[in-house]
């Protein structure tokens, strides 16, 4: 039997020590949108003033219930469209976070839509400590924006970008999508060139995924659009090449960031530290309707229903729908799968520190198979995916999951 303070089988000493420390990462889901995009499978609903006010009050209560266990170094407001909240609603949330000593994160991101950014809102967020904004651009082609059901125009993107710079934000991300139905390589190149010319510190670019229960999936099943895998591969290669030429370093399958320092590095200076925590199997609280949290090996999921979420919190309870506690090996397998999305892969020593398992022992056959297929590379200090492996990261990751 292990003594007090000694790691149990399959558990690292770092994980044991973390049990006594507050959680350093916080995600908050804002479920409201002006309209539902054709491709979106995230939980969201149409904005409504009364419902939004009720949500804000419930969120403040949820923050109060977990604040004792939080000292956030990264905060991420995602959605939905967080910037649909009005100034008074934002003030209520930010004032509560200040009272609860939850501000002051070294990285504090808010997702925003170019159609819902205002100078007053940007100044308010900046004044309370938000220092990173992620602008949901998706495309700079007017026809494709309409095809996706986006509510903003290409002109709004440029106007919002300038507005955010004027408000003092020096860490901006642009979100793009590729392999959109009817999108050509030429239109993708034009969007990339215009987006990169803005000079943002970070770029995220995702291939369209046909999620069930979305209009885009229904169109695919009805034969109104199709998937061109060769074209998607060409678009991905163009993305990697053009981003690199513009000084943005790929550090994860879909993410690119600037680096101001010299020498060898695994993660660029302007990488999204909140997301790096996900890929490195760190704990985080997830608040808001549908939000998932992962705290000390226990995964929770809130109700994907704003009314039920509010009902629970108005009764003084967390709005948790499900709780799952994975065994040590299953947790380590998930950690391996997520971490291999990063260009740096998993350093063996770091993986063992985080999970308590040796990647070279439990997953040796899987790593050899990926290397033999040209998808992975086993080096003396780490295992990482090749450029082709990163393109097929989801497929490669399946090999590392364990029951």
Image (cartoon, grey):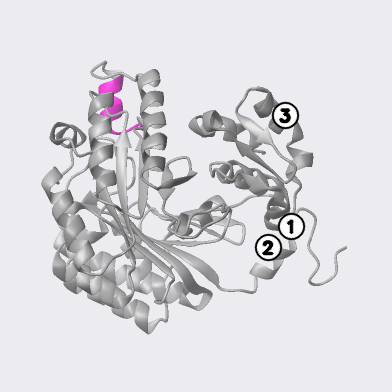
Residue 322: percent from the left, percent from the top?
Answer: 49, 53
In this rendering, the answer to whether 229 lies above or below 173 is above
Residue tagged 1: 11
CA distance separating discs 2 and 1: 7 Å
Q: Residue furthest top?
A: 223
User: Closer to the camera, 256 or 275?
Assistant: 256
SS for tag 3?
helix
Between disc 3 and disc 1, whose residue precedes?
1
Between disc 3 and disc 2, whose residue precedes?
2
Q: In the image, which disc is placed on residue 15? A: 2
Residue 130: percent from the left, percent from the top?
Answer: 33, 69
Q: Residue furthest front?
A: 262
Whether residue 340 is visible to the viewer of this picture, yes or no, is yes
Q: Report the span colored magenta.
A: 211-220
User: Closer to the camera, 370 or 394?
Assistant: 370
Residue tagged 3: 368
User: Closer to the camera, 287 or 278?
Assistant: 278
58 displayed left or right of 65: left
CA distance separating discs 3 and 2: 28 Å
- CB under 8 Å between callouts 2 and 1? yes
In this rendering, the answer to whether 325 lies above or below 94 is above
- CB under 8 Å between callouts 3 and 1? no
SS for tag 2?
helix
């Amino acid at each position: 039997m292990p003594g007090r303070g000694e790691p149990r089988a399959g558990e690292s000493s770092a994980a044991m020590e973390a049990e006594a420390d507050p959680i350093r990462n916080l995600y908050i889901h804002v479920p409201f949108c002006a309209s539902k995009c054709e491709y979106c499978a995230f939980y969201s609903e149409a904005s409504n003033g009364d419902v939004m006010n009720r949500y804000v009050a419930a969120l403040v209560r949820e923050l109060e219930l977990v604040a004792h266990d939080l000292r956030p170094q990264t905060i991420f407001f995602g959605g939905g469209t967080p910037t649909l909240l009005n100034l008074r609603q934002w003030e209520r949330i930010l004032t509560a976070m200040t009272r609860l000593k939850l501000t002051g994160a070294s990285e504090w991101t808010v997702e925003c839509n170019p159609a819902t950014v205002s100078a007053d809102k940007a100044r308010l967020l900046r004044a309370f400590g938000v220092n990173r904004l992620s602008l949901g651009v998706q495309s700079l082609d007017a026809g494709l924006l309409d095809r996706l059901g986006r509510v903003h125009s290409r002109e709004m993107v440029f106007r919002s970008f300038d507005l955010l710079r004027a408000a003092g934000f020096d860490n901006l991300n642009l979100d793009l999508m590729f392999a959109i139905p009817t999108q050509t390589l030429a239109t993708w190149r034009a969007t990339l060139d215009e987006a990169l010319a803005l000079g943002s510190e970070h770029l995220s670019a995702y291939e369209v995924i046909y999620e069930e229960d979305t209009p885009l999936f229904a169109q695919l099943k009805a034969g109104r659009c199709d998937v061109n895998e060769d074209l998607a591969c060409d678009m991905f290669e163009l993305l990697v090449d053009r981003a690199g030429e513009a000084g943005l370093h790929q550090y994860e399958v879909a993410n690119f960031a600037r680096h101001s320092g010299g020498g060898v590095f695994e993660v660029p200076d302007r990488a999204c530290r909140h997301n790096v925590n996900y890929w490195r199997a760190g704990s985080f609280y997830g608040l808001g309707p549908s939000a998932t949290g992962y705290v000390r090996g226990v995964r929770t999921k809130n109700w994907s229903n704003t009314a039920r979420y509010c009902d629970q919190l108005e009764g003084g309870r967390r709005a948790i729908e499900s709780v799952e506690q994975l065994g040590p090996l299953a947790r380590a397998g998930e950690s391996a799968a997520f971490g291999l999305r990063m260009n740096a892969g998993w350093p063996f020593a770091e993986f063992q520190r985080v999970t308590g398992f040796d990647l070279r022992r439990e997953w040796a056959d899987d790593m050899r198979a990926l290397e033999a297929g040209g998808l992975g590379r086993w080096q003396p200090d780490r295992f990482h995916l090749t450029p082709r492996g990163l393109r097929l990261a989801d497929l490669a990751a399946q090999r590392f999951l364990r029951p």
